[in-house]
Image (cartoon, rainbow, N blue to C red):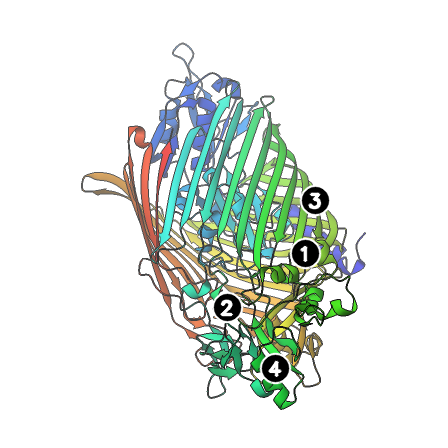
Amino acid sequence: MGSNRYNKGAASRLRWVLVGLLACAGAAQAQAGAAEHDYEVPAGDLAQAVNKLSQQSKIQVIYDLSLLKGKTASSLKGHMSLHRALDQLLAGSGLKWAQTDENTIVLQQAATAAEPAPRAPAGEVKEPKDKTTVVMESVGVTASRIDRPDLVAPTPSIPITAEELELDSRTNIGAALNDLPYFRATSSPQTTGSNTGAGNAPVDLRGLGISRTLVLVDSRRISSDNDLNTVPSILVKTVDVVTGGASAAWGSGAVGGVVNITLNHDLQGGKVGIQGGRSAFDDADERRVEAAWGTAFADGRGHFVIGGEYLDNDGIVPRSARPRAGRWAVMKNANGQLALTPDVGFSDAGYGGLILSGVLKGKAFNPDGSLRNFDYGRVVGAVMQGGEGPSNDDYSPLSAPLKRYAALASVRYDLTDTVRATADLRHSRMFNNYIWFGDHNRGNLTVQADNAFLPQAVKDAMAAAGESQLRIGRFNDDINYPHINYNRETTQATFALDGYFGESWRWTGYYSHGDYQMNIDTPGFILSKEWNYAVDSVIDPASGKPVCRVTLSNPSVHCVPINLFGRGAPSKEAVAYVTGTPQQRSTTTLDTYGASVRGEPFSLPAGEVSVAYGLEGRREAIDQRVGAQDAAKAFRSFSFNPMKGSFTVKEAFGEVLVPVLKEVPGFQNLAFNAAARVSDYSTTGSIWSWKVGATDEVFDGFRLRAARSRDIRSANLSELFTTLTTGWNNVVDPTNNQTVYALTNGGGNRNLRPETADTTTLGVSWSPKSVEGLDFSLDYFNIDIQDVIIAINPQDILNRCQAGNQELCARVERDSSGNIVRIVNSFTNLAQYKTDGADLEASYKWKVDWFGVEGRARFRTLATWVHSLTTDDGVNTLEYVGSQGYAFNLGVPRWRAISSFSYDSERYSFNARARYISAGKYDRNQAIVNNEIGNYVYFDVGGAYRFGKDNAFEAYANVSNLGNKKSPIGSTFSPYYDVIGRYYTAGFRYKF
């Protein structure tokens, strides 16, 4: 059981939550069926056609399955009202429809000439007693467990259709979402660099970190670190984004919000696609193919769907292929001020070796072993501008090469008229292979005067000066520069049952198991013992040949001496002897289960009261194994570490929606909503999350909404169980403004406390009936997170220490001269994150008749304004709004916006977008003289042409970053700026 520190006040909170659950909640109704939508329903089984129509209109349709059995429907396609669509779909079926309220349609047997049906009074159409399908079958996630349209939810939510995801030919869901201003981009072809997460596509709402955005597929957690690349985009029906806390409804992690991907389990027929892309610089080539097919079986009681995609992206290698990206760093200028500086390389290492001590200091080795004067450029500590200083940016990728595939198979079957079984299997695999960071000697290589390979001219100079050894810095690109071979594989299987009982009740239960396998091999890292043996070579007195000194005293030692004096001097045999391959084999498992019920237990004068309640649980576990050399700590600069651990959580939740007033002046539809969840973790005990909210339609089309929630996030497996990690980072020591290459150690912490977040949202939406097609919404958000779980980046540790945080100063180890030796950045609970701002959405849709061709046009603008994003470590508060040039810090622009125009007709479509990023700074928490980044606007355009029978063929093309706008200087890892440049994409789709 959990610790009492999380139960403090729990009884009091529970009383208030229960009062809220009994007394308040809200249920908003959808717009009337007279509103027009785009419909596309294939011919076939009538029940399936009705389900499809309901999903596209977001209006629930209730019917008795026996009335529809054996009936078929003709295809339906076009822009029309729901009422007209129903008339066409039911033509000749002997059925009629009736609207019971603004959100519900009931299908009934039509009256015959001999037996006219009695007409029910207006508003009293009765629902069938034995109704079997309440469509809106796929759960569209809002901040509620109870279905409700997006514009009237108490917490804002944004639905994104598959058609919208296809507009700009984005090759994964994450890349499409990263364009939206609510998200802080994480990794995509435009932002991915060389790290062990290259090729992943997680999402980050509000810039609070990917672990604070909960990602669901069909309303269930996924087992792949929230990587959206594991989901085949060809089978995505919608993506629902909740931009506010939703832990009470969906569980831990929903602090910044929720992203739910609803898959198309109703696909009838097939579709295939092929796509290719290339940048204006003739690189970053990409190839993509996709296919999907679905069919009904067993007279419509069952349905089977299968689909998948394959992608191959060449990436961009190296970083310095883009002059504004590679070889930039923060270092002192000539006036002693910090500045973003181009052409920065190491000053303490050279290709083939640089002598750093003694009479030959400043001499570098040529490939033949002779000496030359090293061109130092302007030196500042361990780096320099200009000269011949080497850099990892000349080798590491700007955009990591990637190959991946993702596939899905799904089957569902109606066991009875009221019970449905569903099973699906998702599988994906991803491959990376690229140069990682180098294993160099940054001024720490000591060579004895009697070294077997040391050129005689050097030996003579040392002897004349009375020197017995010298210190060398060497950029070891000729010693098998380390590569990373990254293989990630995800498999997840789910079985679910759902059904109906009574007049309005629906139940569901499920179990899901997922495995996430991650295998990493990084050949080329130097082995400590072997390196020391091989470097210390002498001439064997007996043979006159170079040997390792250790073999003279211990002949049993196997050793191959290495020649380090000149680029290309090391032999293949010596390189093989001194290098090894760090290896990691990691298996993460996720088991989830749950059962829930929702329905309407009774009515009030203002409408039906809705409730939802249920139980959920999950177990997460990791078993990370490493190679024998890693386990023995045989590598001098990097080793993988084993990790093993697990935790379980058991949860119960409940929610209620209560309509309070209806058709009262100023309160056309006032409703309250409340939810609560208790989560019992095996690691930290019990903790509550809750939400209260309200919505009101003040007058037709004008709505207000408000919500307050307590959200939670418990530590994940890596944060809890990671063992000691080792890395190297360039940092600026604030005590002297010197740039140093610092050793960093990280790791997990089993004593981490859960995060708690208080979230407030206030919003207004307006869809005036007098201007059909116009929608507007404005929402304010305020998120205050306590006990933030974080591994503070090394530069932030130094900055906060300099500002007076003694706890963080204890994480910085210095030698007797004050030089940084090591920085410890293991996970800890920071005091606070806090952010607030506002989201704006405005759109207008209308019919057009251009050049005699009827079509539909749409303008849409999404914008986010962030007032503040701060961290507080208990001593210092740092502001990160406008800090937008460096991915390893928090940081968001003040403004981000995207405006789009789209036109679509039967054969043609066209779209254009403008993406805006407001002016900011590279890093507002460092005093950099050229810190400013101006306003940025990117333009994208695209078009498509459909042809053939039923327009089954479609050819399309898109251009992103049409103006080929260059990224800001030094923005190699920025999550906001396009570092690739203008990019062309073209493809072809076919439906059958």
> Visible in this render: residue 43?
yes
Looking at marks 2 and 4 on the same chain, the residue that comes earlier in the sequence is marked by: 4
Q: Are marks 2 and 4 in contact (CB under 8 Å)?
A: no
Q: Position of residue 742 (x, y in %)?
A: 62, 74
Instruction: Decide which of 948, 33 is in the foreground and name it.
Output: 948
Query: Helix, strand or loop at disc 4?
Result: helix
Q: What amino acid is at disc 3?
A: Arg
The reply, left or right, for residue 34 in relation to residue 60 is left
Residue that badge 1 annotates: 718
Q: What amino acid is at disc 4?
A: Lys
Looking at marks 3 and 2 on the same chain, the residue that comes earlier in the sequence is marked by: 3
Looking at marks 4 and 1 on the same chain, the residue that comes earlier in the sequence is marked by: 4
Q: CA distance from mark 4 to mark 3?
A: 67 Å
Query: Helix, strand or loop at disc 3?
Result: strand
Q: CA distance from mark 1 to mark 3?
A: 17 Å
Residue that badge 2 annotates: 886
Q: Are marks 1 and 3 in contact (CB under 8 Å)?
A: no
Residue that badge 4 annotates: 459
Indicate which disc residue 458 carries. none
Q: What amino acid is at disc 1?
A: Ser
Dot 1, how many residues are within 10 Å of its Cα: few (below 14), some (14-19), or many (20+)? some
Q: CA distance from mark 3 to mark 2?
A: 36 Å
Q: CA distance from mark 1 to mark 2?
A: 23 Å
